[in-house]
Image: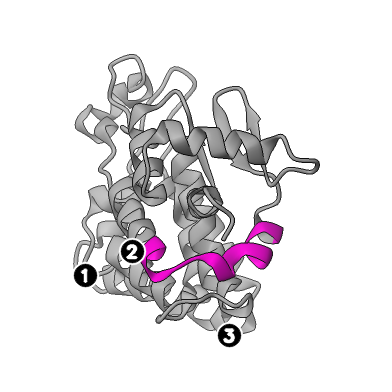
């Protein structure tokens, strides 16, 4: 088993200057971050290393290739830690939503920002896609199929009548959630649209700024566009 690399594989990316990111990585790795860091630095220094660092951001050099080669080393225990990380990180409510729409563009200045970095949020979302789309064809040694775990996690984020704040909070990763589990994503969207006051409307709430307003709905449109390329989902996307 490639020591220390499974946590990097599952996280996808993280920011070493963010203490909350380091806590999540350490939990997935089952070790303290200092020990994990020494290991991942050694991996980075290999010729054509599987990880790279840009500033404080660590990321996989070639995610698809890494999953194709190394997913077989991921255990059920590793996936339990990954699932918890996805729930904690992607399930976090955006503190910017506490501000009036006219002040949300100032969220960073007012310290109304996610506890976890955008790097980790994107990295986990990318890994969720690879878990749902690639892992089952790469010898994943798990008692559950990757596609089933992706469905469960996307449903846990968006299903069960997720409220408007949840939809708004995950807006930046909606295209990834749709790609990870189209069925879970579309079911959650259709469930919301059946309500008299669909929670999904929160994505269309304008956020005024010095250069004009804007909602979060563009990510929903991108998610639907991704699925529309697949004939089996086109009918549901266009309804």
Residue denoted by label 1:
160
Q: Position of residue 36 (x, y in %)?
A: 47, 39
Q: Position of residue 225 (x, y in %)?
A: 59, 63
**Label 3 SS:** helix
Q: Earlier in the sequence, mark 2 or mark 3?
A: 2
Q: Is residue 33 above or below residue 210?
A: below
Spatial separation of the CA atoms under disc 1 and disc 2? 21 Å
Residue at 55 percent across and 39 percent down: it is 39
Q: Is residue 60 left or right of residue 30?
A: right
Q: Is residue 158 above or below residue 146?
A: above
Q: Earlier in the sequence, mark 1 or mark 2?
A: 2
Q: Residues within 10 Å of mark 2 (few under 14, many from 20)?
A: few
Q: Main secondary structure of the magenta part?
A: helix
Residue denoted by label 3:
232
Residue denoted by label 2:
80
Q: Residues within 10 Å of mark 1 (few under 14, many from 20)?
A: few
Spatial separation of the CA atoms under disc 2 and disc 3? 31 Å
Residue at 56 percent across and 50 percent down: it is 5
Q: Position of residue 155 (x, y in %)?
A: 32, 69
Taking the image as drawn, is residue 179 in sight? Answer: no
Q: Is residue 154 left or right of residue 125?
A: left
Q: Are marks 1 and 3 in contact (CB under 8 Å)?
A: no
Q: Earlier in the sequence, mark 1 or mark 3?
A: 1
The mark closer to the camera, 2 or 3, is: 2
Magenta-span inclusion, residue 77: yes
The range drawn in magenta is 65-79
Residue 70 circle label: none
Spatial separation of the CA atoms under disc 1 and disc 3? 24 Å
């Amino acid at each position: 088993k490639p020591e220390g690399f499974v946590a990097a594989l599952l996280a996808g990316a993280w920011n070493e200057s963010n203490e909350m990111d380091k806590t999540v990585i350490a939990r997935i790795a089952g070790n303290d971050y200092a020990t994990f860091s020494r290991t991942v630095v050694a991996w980075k220094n290999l010729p054509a290393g599987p990880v790279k660092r840009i500033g404080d951001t660590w990321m996989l050099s070639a995610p698809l290739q890494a999953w194709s080669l190394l997913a077989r080393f991921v255990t059920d225990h590793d996936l339990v830690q990954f699932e918890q990380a996805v729930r904690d990180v992607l399930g976090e409510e955006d503190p910017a939503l506490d501000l009036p729409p006219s002040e949300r563009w100032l969220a960073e200045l007012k310290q109304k920002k996610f506890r976890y970095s955008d790097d980790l949020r994107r990295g986990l979302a990318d890994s969720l896609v690879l878990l749902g789309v690639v892992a089952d064809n790469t010898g994943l040694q798990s008692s559950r199929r990757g596609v089933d775990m992706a469905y469960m996690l996307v449903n846990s984020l968006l299903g069960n009548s997720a409220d408007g704040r949840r939809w708004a909070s995950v807006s930046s990763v909606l295209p990834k959630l749709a790609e990870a589990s189209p069925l879970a994503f579309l079911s959650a969207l259709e469930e919301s649209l059946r309500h008299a006051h669909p929670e999904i409307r929160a994505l269309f709430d304008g956020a005024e700024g010095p250069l004009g307003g804007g909602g979060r709905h563009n990510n929903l449109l991108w998610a639907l566009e991704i699925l529309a390329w697949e004939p089996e989902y086109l009918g549901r996307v266009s309804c």
